[in-house]
């Protein structure tokens, strides 16, 4: 067989596989979106809808908010274990999971106000105990400042981001280059194209076993893992990650929205040694930048501990920024349960009893 015929056959075969992946990607997304009402409910915020999964009952409402690029199934395992103590709400921010995209810029103020609107529309009444990981913790903090009378407690899970401060970035040129908005946008747009073409879905089992972004999912129950993976495949995932990433620098201005209320504030700090290791391994930073980053992280953590007279620092052992969500579950559940109890005690004080 002539060489050009071999190339032609190979080309047509690859083209056929590509078209198959493309068509199946569209079909799979459409089929998965129909599962929203199987796992939870949708709430209309006025032209766009938020997904939520709610378990338990009681006068205290616990709200879980995930980090950038992570959807609500990451909390489902903990939610089931906490449901006997209070009403536990896991929701997807705009653009993640089954939630629609929002017309508003993705800064923490807008996301905090959207959270309040969602809670009102869904009929979830205060007091609220807010649990946020990474970016979700900043949203929780912003919410508490805007709605202090409705917030009974906040658990911030590893939310120190000294790298968002422009002055700090001047001292960390390598980190600034590696984490630049331009670089992140290019990476996510490339991922978006791969997802759109169905290539990521076709490589599912390789990604789940090899790629750090996806191996993270392997630590969660199969149902949650599958739904998080499906959430990575939808077009709005990459777009939303970029929109939130662009506004990360604005977390430096959260304090301008008002004082933090005198409520219980627990800050979960992951292992500094593991964090240093990740900085070297993931970002290839020189040690002077790593040490500067760690120093500034401690400053941020200490500043958080001054936000409320009821602040408390809790160390999560050897957990990393992402592993804390699965290897420190018992600790997180214990601290959330404490916040629920404190909120319940406050409810039955004379000033709250009608």
Image: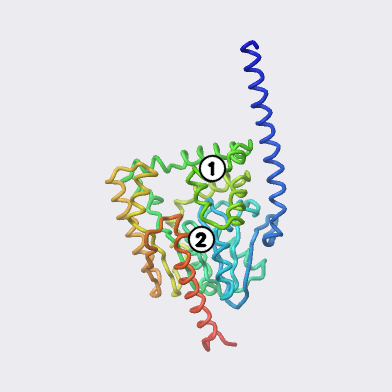
Residue extending furthest top?
Answer: 2
Apparent side of residue 317 relative to residue 5 in the rendered image (left or right) = left
Residue named by callout 2: 139
Q: Nearer the viewer, residue 171 or 81?
A: 81
Q: Nearer the viewer, mark 1 or mark 2?
A: 1
Q: Split into 4 quadrants, where in the image is the N terminus?
A: top right
- Picture coordinates of residue 156, whole percent (x, y): 45, 64
Q: Which mark is residue 166?
A: none
User: How many neighbours does mark 1 have within 10 angstroms: few (below 14), some (14-19), or many (20 or more)?
Assistant: some
- Picture coordinates of residue 61, whole percent (x, y): 58, 72
Residue at left offset 48%, top offset 59%: 326
Residue extending furthest front?
Answer: 1
- Picture coordinates of residue 23, whole percent (x, y): 71, 37
Distance (Cα) linking label 1 and label 2: 30 Å
Q: Nearer the viewer, residue 321 or 260?
A: 321
- Picture coordinates of residue 212, whole percent (x, y): 47, 46
Q: Based on the displayed image, in which of its 4 quarters is residue 179 positioned?
A: top left
Q: Nearer the viewer, residue 76 or 126?
A: 76
Residue named by callout 1: 207
Apparent side of residue 183 relative to residue 11 in the rendered image (left or right) = left
Q: Based on the displayed image, in which of its 4 quarters is residue 253 positioned?
A: bottom left
């Amino acid at each position: 067989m002539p060489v050009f015929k071999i190339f032609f056959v190979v080309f047509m075969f690859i083209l056929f596989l590509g078209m198959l992946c493309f068509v199946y990607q569209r079909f799979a997304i459409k089929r998965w979106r129909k599962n929203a009402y199987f796992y939870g409910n949708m709430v209309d915020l006025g032209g766009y809808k938020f997904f939520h999964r709610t378990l338990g009952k009681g006068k205290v409402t616990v709200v879980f908010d995930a980090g950038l690029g992570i959807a609500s199934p990451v909390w489902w395992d903990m939610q089931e274990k906490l449901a006997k103590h209070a009403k536990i709400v896991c929701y997807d921010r705009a653009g993640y999971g089954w939630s629609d995209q929002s017309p508003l810029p993705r800064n923490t103020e807008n996301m905090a106000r959207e959270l309040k609107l969602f809670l009102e529309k869904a009929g979830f009444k205060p007091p609220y105990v807010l649990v946020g990981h990474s970016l979700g913790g900043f949203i929780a903090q912003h919410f508490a400042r805007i709605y202090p009378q409705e917030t009974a407690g906040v658990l911030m899970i590893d939310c120190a981001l000294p790298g968002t401060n422009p002055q700090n970035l001047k001292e960390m040129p390598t980190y600034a280059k590696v984490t630049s908005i331009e670089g992140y946008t290019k990476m996510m747009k490339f991922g978006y194209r791969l997802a759109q073409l169905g290539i990521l879905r076709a490589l599912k089992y390789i990604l789940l076993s090899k790629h750090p972004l996806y191996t993270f999912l392997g630590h969660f129950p199969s149902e949650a893992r599958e739904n998080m993976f499906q959430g990575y495949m939808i077009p709005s995932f990459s777009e939303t990650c970029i929109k939130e990433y662009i506004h990360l620098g604005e977390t430096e201005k959260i304090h301008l929205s008002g004082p933090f209320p005198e409520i219980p504030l627990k800050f979960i700090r992951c292992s500094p040694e593991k964090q240093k290791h990740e900085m070297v391994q993931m970002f290839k930073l020189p040690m002077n930048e790593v040490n500067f980053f760690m120093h500034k992280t401690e400053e941020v953590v200490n500043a958080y501990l001054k936000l409320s007279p009821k602040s408390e620092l809790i160390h999560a052992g050897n957990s990393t920024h992402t592993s804390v969500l699965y290897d420190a579950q018992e600790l997180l559940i214990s601290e959330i349960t404490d916040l629920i109890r404190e909120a319940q005690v406050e409810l039955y004080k004379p000033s709250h009893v009608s």
